Amino acid sequence: MKQTSSDPLVATETWFVQHGLPYFVPEERAAARAALRPRRAIPLLVLVALVAAALGGLLGWFSDQVSAAPALWLTLAFLAGLVYASTALRARPILGWALGRTFSSLRLLLSTASRALPLLLVFVTFLFINAEAWEMTSQLPFGRLWLAVLLLLGLGVMFLLVRLPEEVDQADDAVDDAVLTRACRGTPLEKPCADLIGDPDADPAAYAEVTGYERWNLITALLIIQATQVLVLVAAVFVFFLLFGSLIMPEEVQGSWTGLGDGIRSFPHLESVSTQLVKVSLFLASFSGLYFTVSAVTDQTYRDQFFAGVTDELERAVGVRAVYLALRARSSRG
């Protein structure tokens, strides 16, 4: 018999999607798995590769910068992957919920930034007021500089992908009846959870372990939340150095430190902001992002702030999923 919207299982599946957990729903998980089959993924991969190669080659030819081609390839590959994940892989709810969760906690984000920025700026400002940093970045074409930025940000993402699974593993290792009750409060499974806990033949905590696509759903949500916070910090550092540099770095100093002399080029209507200032600010902001990513996950001082509230969301997702699976198992037996 077809289930109706009053069915707690169907209501819970809707709740999963609304809370950025589409892969907790079997149908969504099956659609994502089908989208990754070679028959569907390879033609799109070839098309993206051809378009990126053509556009990268044209950009490198017109700009006379060979490094502009791989920089554009990586950027287009990321954008294509983001679009494919949001559509075919059914990951749009993950992206939407994670971004909404981040910006809805703007006060917490500002608190984290206010604690991290002062020490970070003290450390990085010594690199900013340094002739070698200006000389190095001024010699980099924008294509090669963008490659360096992508490399630094990519290293930060790789580090998070290594450490974030540990957070998920900790969340599903400590599930008991109290955790299940707390997790299901205010969800469609609040009453079924109490019934299952009171049933001696049911053991919903046995379904707590998260694996496969569901595990990657949680990791991806965590990654987006943390990456968004880091990008906000990177943007703040970039703007700070633009303002700071425009105040204390006259063109004569910039010309001396970069070795360009009178070759400093400023933006129209922004005489105090040169392309060399933008380059060094972008590079140091990206370096700051990598530094903060590592510190936020390994330093307990920042870790408590960085993961504030996220562990509660993990516990809730794992608990609701365990009760959902237990209820599905009992329904199938009945």
Image: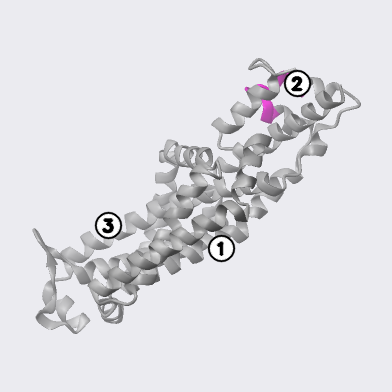
Disc 3, SS: helix
Q: Is residue 5 left or right of residue 236?
A: right
For residue 205, what is the image quadrant?
top right
The reply to whether the magenta stretch includes residue 186 is yes
Q: Which mark is residue 192?
A: 2
Mark 1 secondary-structure assignment: helix
Question: Picture coordinates of residue 130 (x, y %)?
Answer: 28, 78
Is mark 1 in CB contact (under 8 Å) with mark 3?
no
- Position of 281 with respect to 164 (left or right) is left
| Residue 117 screen position, x and y as percent | 38, 57
Residue at 67%, 30% in the rendered image = 183
Answer left or right for 31 relative to 325. Answer: left
User: Pointer 1: what residue?
Assistant: 159
How packed is label 1: few (under 14 Cα within 10 Å), some, or many (20 or more)? some
Q: Quadrant of the N terminus?
A: top right
Q: Magenta segment: does it hold 179?
A: no
Q: Which residues are magenta?
A: 182-193
Q: Amino acid at mark 1?
A: Phe
